[in-house]
Amino acid sequence: MAKKTVTLPIGWRGQPVASALQQKEQEPINIKGHNLTKNVYYASSFVPPEWIAAHGFRPYRILPDGHAASTEAIRVPEREGLCPYAADIAAQAGHKNQIMVFANTCDQMRRAPESVIQDPSRTFFMHIPATWNNPEAETYYQSELTRLGGYLEAMGGSAPSKENMLSIMQRYEAGRQELLASRKSCCARAHIARTSHFYQTGTCPPLHNALRSAPTSTPLMLLGSHLRQADLAIFDQIENAGAHVAIDATDGGEREWPRALQPQNMQTDPLHELAQAYFLTIPAVFRRPNDALYQWLQQAVETHSHLRGIIFVTQPWCDLWKAELPRLQSAISLPILHVPLGGGAHESRATRIEAFLEMIA
């Protein structure tokens, strides 16, 4: 099969990478006897790592500023009109010069790679329909997965057998369930580190390294844009102010995880089940209509009745999330503090968080 080049769209969240993970980037992972050694980098929640692994590649979720030392020289400077998250992702993708899967979940993520990708033949753009609540959109998304599979085969991968596909889907599902089960036993930083480890190695690290006593401080939801490595200080600022993040609803947090994979559906048609779990249930902000986002938020607030407030974060030039603030304020009963990310407002951000907690105390 001849190599293909495609053109499509993008989106997901940025999470931290512990220094130990930097050494694991080139280490093979083993899934039910299948050694996966060649990396395929991706950044969107709508790119299933199960599908990449089933074709014989190692799925590796690229993280903004993930490797601080090596990224310093390739980071795209923040400038007017350019999303710093999208710029970081694109810069790392161009620097790695490996197979990279982008998706078009916003204009910034769709256009940012154009100036840094060195080898277009190693870049796959996946179209994610913004309109989602109709059968045609679901069929289109599954066809995009099929197209991605054809591209991976053209790049040296192999067509997945049903047995291999099932074993990989079961492994990733078990990993996500383990992360969810341990969520309350971890501080927010530890949970993010474990999640990053999972999406970059396919395994969960030992829980004893992340255990802590149950939090007794003020529980909050963190909602909004992708987080860069430099933004993770907000978790420390929240804890230093006497609160903790009980729900990470930023892009790339548990809000953008697929629903649980159903064993019976997996046996019947694993690709269709994978497409439904990812496309139909992730309540992303770019979906139109995005009522599913508000249904998810309402359910989260009702399920976690102890929540006291929401810290709403936005990256510079992230118009999708900024446009949602008025609707959020009218639709959600909890107090909301808008905290813009980026720039050098580190100390003022901490002061605003402290004042917010005093207000809701």
Image: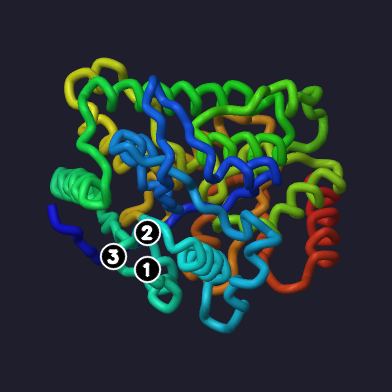
Q: What whole-number distance in Å separates the C-alpha atoms at marks 2 and 1? A: 8 Å
Q: Nearer the viewer, mark 2 or mark 3?
A: 3
Q: Identify which residue is drawn at 60% across, 71% down.
A: 75
Instruction: Tell me if label 2 and label 3 are in contact, CB under 8 Å.
Output: no
Residue at screen point 63% across, 23% down? 182
Q: Compute the Cα span from label 2 to label 3.
A: 13 Å
Label 1: which residue?
Answer: 110
Does residue 79 appear to the left or right of 288 in the view shown?
right
Task: Kindly identify which residue carries mark 2.
Answer: 102
Give how far across and how far down residue 203 sits, in percent: 53, 29
**Residue 132 seen in the current view:** no
Q: Residues within 10 Å of mark 1 (few under 14, many from 20)?
A: many
The kind of residue tagged 1 is Arg
- Disc 3/disc 1 C-alpha distance (Å): 16 Å
**Identity of the residue drawn at 28% across and 65% down:** 121
* Image quadrant occupied by the C terminus: top right
Sequence-wise, which precedes: disc 3 or disc 1?
Answer: 1
Q: Nearer the viewer, mark 3 or mark 1?
A: 3
x and y percent of residue 226 in the render?
A: 55, 56
Which residue carries the number 3 mark? 121
Q: Quick check: marks 2 and 1 in contact, CB under 8 Å?
A: yes
Marks 3 and 1 close (CB-CB < 8 Å)? no
Residue 292 picture location, percent across and down: 38, 44
Q: Tell me if 1 is positioned left or right of 261 in this view.
A: left
Q: Where does the image place residue 98, in percent across and percent down from the top left? A: 42, 58
| Residue closest to the eye, 174 or 99 | 99
